[in-house]
Amino acid sequence: MLHSKLLNTLILAALVAPGIAMAEDAPAAAPAPAFTSNVALVSDYLYRGISQTGGKPAIQGGFDYAHTSGFYAGVWGSSISWLTDSPAVTGATSSQLELDTYLGFKNSFAEDFSYDVGYLRYNYPASYTATLPAGAAKADTDEIYGALGYKFVTAKYSYSLGNVFGIDKSKGTTYLDVTATYPVADSGFTLIAHAGKQTYKGSVADGLVAANSTPTYSDYKLGVTKDFGGFVFGLAYSNTNANKTQYTSGTGKFLGKNTTVLSLTRTF
């Protein structure tokens, strides 16, 4: 995610009136719909710089509700393979699906500032049906988050309410990131720059650090998107300083390596 994983729709209405018409005579722009949906194809599903699909493509999609007050809620899903690929769950029947549910409140203030607070749960249906290895927990993860934005730059802080992505006793794990999303006027292009740090807390994480397999790492991304009549194409380069021992799959693939990702997204 994101893993940040949240999607929004902007609808621009171009109203052309005859030169002799007064501005107040033009009809008002249609309000943005309360319910939207989205679907995407990606060449690799990266969440906070770590591949969730072993470097392979994924299909993704979701539904969102947004109220004029600023309240929003939604559900989003993606195909994954990281649980099945993990050497720690050999012999287990693991989920091939990530299904996220979230709700929150966001709004703007002082003209150029914005804020966003909310709750997000990462669900992995049917994950870990076998006996869990020592130090492991179910992958389901709960986070609360808060974000503050100024113009096209946003800083976000996420805090875990319990175990995080399969690591036991990891409550209090955090992710801090800064993202710049700059739309190039009248071009359909958007430039993206991102940096974040996932910091694992707890006794199990401390043990992994002592074993030279720290789960804490930083990730970086540079990207660009282009809107072609509602179809948004994306190209992004991502890299991390993740520990290879911790983030190498059972098939020997390093999931935090530098990589380029292509994407195609459509919002309805």
Image: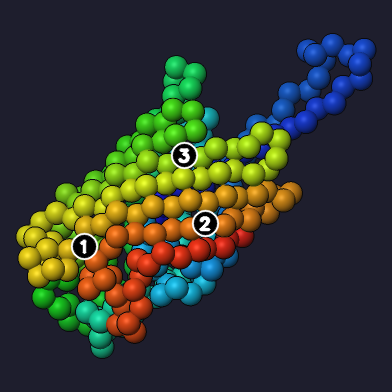
Q: Position of residue 48 (x, y in %)?
A: 36, 56
Residue highlighted by disc 2:
236
Judged from the image, the secondary structure of the residue bearing numbered disc 1 is: loop
**Sequence-wise first label, 2 or 3:** 3
Q: Give residue 215's mark.
A: 1
Name the residue type under label 3. Ala
Report the residue at 12% width, 63% height from top: 209
Callout 1 environment at 10 Å: few (<14), some (14 to 19), or many (20+)? many
Q: For this rendering, which residue is in front, 233 or 194?
A: 194
Q: How far apart are labels 3 and 1 at the CA level?
A: 26 Å
Q: How far apart are labels 2 and 1 at the CA level?
A: 24 Å
Q: How far apart are labels 2 and 3 at the CA level?
A: 13 Å
Q: Position of residue 87 (x, y in %)?
A: 25, 81
On screen, residue 108 above or below 261 = above
Q: Is residue 115 left or right of residue 185?
A: left
Callout 2 environment at 10 Å: few (<14), some (14 to 19), or many (20+)? some
Name the residue type under label 2. Ala
Report the residue at 17% width, 77% height from top: 132
On screen, residue 15 above or below 140 = above
Q: Position of residue 135 (x, y in %)?
A: 12, 71
Q: Pointers 3 and 1 in contact (CB under 8 A)?
A: no
Name the residue type under label 1. Pro
**Sequence-wise first label, 3 or 1:** 3
Residue highlighted by disc 3:
180
